[in-house]
Amino acid sequence: MNVAEQISAIHQINDALDDLSSEFPNYRFNLETSLNENWFSDALAWLLDPKGTHGLGIKGIEAFVRLIAQHRSNSEKKYARRNSFLKFGKAGRGTPSTKFSYRNISTVREYHLSRAIGACQEQGGLYCDLICIDFDISDSLLIVVENKLWGKNGPGQLTRYFEAVEAKFKSQVKCREYVYLTLGGEYPVFHEEDNPSIAKKWVQIGWMNDLLPLMQQSCSAKSNPYLKRVIEVMNWLWHLSNRISKDWTEKLVNTYRHAYEVCLREELNRLTGKGTWEIEHAYGSRRLEHTSLPARRLKVEISESGLSIEIQGLIHEKPLFETIIIPIGVHPNQAINLIDIAAKEIMNGFFPDPSKFKNSARWKKNKMQGAKLEYATLFELGYRHPSAVRFLLTR
């Protein structure tokens, strides 16, 4: 896309978000205070706790266990089947989801998964986002939930968690389940460090397509303000996903990355008195390079959380200086100021002797021109709809 097409796409996305805002008048407050993994994990822990103020009793955890069992038993998804996993119905290996009483079950946030005594592997500091535990001998159950609202699972993460839980609880808990929870039920990222079969051991569940319908069916959905708020946030995300297609989302992601690359290149060229900065394709991606030092590059990426632009200097693909962060969602003027500040930081960290490359006459003067003006609409979009933009950038 050229700049005109990019700006046209931004206007259309902005119009769609404005329409959605009018339908959900409280969305700004709800999203800005709720759209983070901790809030979602806390909300789920509350919903699954039979003693929670939601008034559901055991119905919340009962429905969640049944949902896990239904996914695990779905032959089309080809999940791993074990006696220690849940199952729905009579067919196949597994523990029936109907055998639990839930009388004494508890939910725990940020559970520290310490290494089992005598375990030889190094575990490090592992913290489960959420676990549901009932260690009563008659119907023992453990559910591990990894809530990935924005980012993805790291290299070896799911393997380490699975192996640590199995080593610690295999002899004590008959049924042990693993849930990979995302907004849309996305598949985990496979890394070289992972066991090849690890993804099949984690049941993929989505907030929007799995948990939202369960919450909407609850008789407490209208009467409990906290549950009502959870549903409203999820409803907004569901509508946003349906109003703005993945094609438009991809255009937004590409436009954000390109806009910061171009604005940064323009400012770096303004500050540089020797040689020029160009956008080149290298190692399968776009990089900023200076003609005098081809071995050094700048990589501009959107962070996994969608909260910021990350700029990394590289020399022979190894870090040259600490990553520079430009937050997304600030006032347009501040976005431009931050680009200018980042350009000066790069000048000082990129060149062996910065004084030989600086244009000193321009160093203390900021200038609003060119790409900064062209992409003002993009910066304005991020400022007016920060939570929506964050969601779309990580979709």
Image (tube, helix red, strand yellow):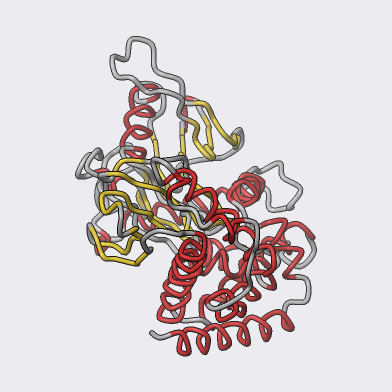
**Percent position of residue 235, x then y:** 62, 72
At horizontal 63% and vertical 75% (from top left) the residue drawn is 381
Vertical arrangement, residue 378 with respect to residue 268, above or below: below
How many marks the image carries: the answer is: 0
Residue 122 makes an appearance in the image = yes
Vertical relation: 213 (above or below) 355:
below
Q: Residue furthest top?
A: 118
**Is residue 217 visible to us here?**
no
* Image coords of residue 268 (percent x, y): 48, 61
Name the residue located 48 percent from the left edge and 75 percent from the top edge. Answer: 252
Which of the 4 quarters of the picture holds residue 254? bottom left
Q: Nearer the viewer, residue 126 or 176?
A: 126
Q: Tell me which corner region of the image, top left, top right, bottom left or bottom right, holds residue 282.
A: bottom left
**393 to 369, vertically: above or below:** above
Residue 182, position as x, y percentages in the image: 47, 57
Nearer-the-camera pick, 204 or 137: 204
| Foreground residue among 66 and 334 | 334
Judge left or right: residue 175 versus residue 284.
Answer: right
Q: The N terminus lies in which quarter of the figure?
A: bottom left
Q: Where in the figure is residue 240, as x and y percent of width and height?
A: 57, 76
Tell me: residue 140, above or below residue 216.
above
Which residue is drawn at the image coordinates 60% and 35% (left, top)?
106
